[in-house]
Image: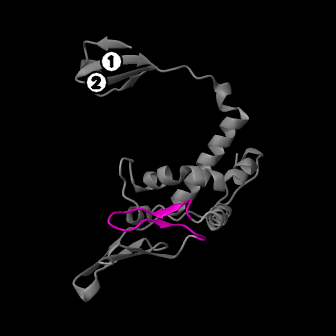
Amino acid sequence: MAQVRQTNTLRFKKTLDSVVYYTVNGKTYARRLPDMPRAMFNTPAAKKRQALFKLVNMHTRYHSGEFTHLFDKGNSWNSRNAYVKANGKALYAALDALADRMVNGELVTATEVENAISTYATANPTAIVLADKAPYAVKYLTGTWPATITLTTGNGAQTTIVHTKGGVSTTVFPEGATSGSTTNQPVTPDDDAIGE
């Protein structure tokens, strides 16, 4: 790591060749990126990690329009990443057998991914967090991904109904004070298969 005194050329560039430039407390530093040999990405463990990543991506892409209504982003980049952060280990466990199939060159469909997660959620009803959005109570996936998810505050003062296939969230206030809805259309991919 070296401190850089002239930063005019780095105004818009953060990486130049294999050197990364970053600023800490107003001082700019440079460090070389590690040289990663290609062989390390071709090990069985690396291929399995890549397959699991692809399968989790397939699942989250299928439900992408729903996460805004179900998760606060917290320290994550967005609500979708917050869902993965909360459920990464459980999703990897649910998709382990499908990842093995992908590594062996088989194709895996979105339906198979959803079925594997549903089966895992049925066997482990508190492993996958379905919704964690303030001020509502945490809700878990206990089987198949529901078509309608009802979120309720602890005191029942407010209820949000999320229609997962349409991406529509309707907020209902008891006593008829106010109601409204917001629309966020999800990206619903075809049931295309992915594989190595």
Q: What's drawn in magenta, residue-wise?
A: 126-144
Tell me, yes or no, whether the highlighted magenta stretch contains residue 176: no
Secondary structure found at label 1: strand
Which quadrant would residue 73 be assigned to in this image? bottom left
Left or right, 171 with reference to 124:
left
Q: What residue type is labelled 2?
A: Val
Secondary structure found at label 2: strand
Q: Which amino acid does label 1 sit on?
A: Tyr
Which quadrant would residue 125 be assigned to in this image? bottom right
**Can you name the residue that lies furthest to the bottom here?**
175
Q: Quadrant of the C terminus?
A: top right
Name the foreground residue: 77 vs 91.
Answer: 91
Which quadrant would residue 163 be assigned to in this image? bottom left
Main SS of residues in magenta: loop
Q: Position of residue 127 (x, y in %)?
A: 56, 59
Total marks shown come to 2
Left or right, 91 with reference to 135:
right
Colour scheme of the picture:
one colour
Q: Name the residue under label 1.
A: 29
Q: Position of residue 35 (x, y in %)?
A: 55, 19
First-in-chain label (1 vs 2) = 2
Vertically, is 60 above or below 50? Answer: below
Identify the residue shown where x is 65% and y is 62%: 120
Measured Cα–Cα span from mark 1 to mark 2? 8 Å
Q: Mark 2 points at which residue?
A: 24
Left or right, 7 with reference to 170:
left
Tell me, yes or no, whether the highlighted magenta stretch contains residue 140: yes
Q: Position of residue 85 (x, y in %)?
A: 48, 49
Name the foreground residue: 116 vs 156.
Answer: 156
Q: How crowded is mark 1: few (under 14 residues within 10 Å), some or many (20 or more)?
A: some
Q: Do the residues labelled 1 and 2 touch (CB within 8 Å)?
A: yes
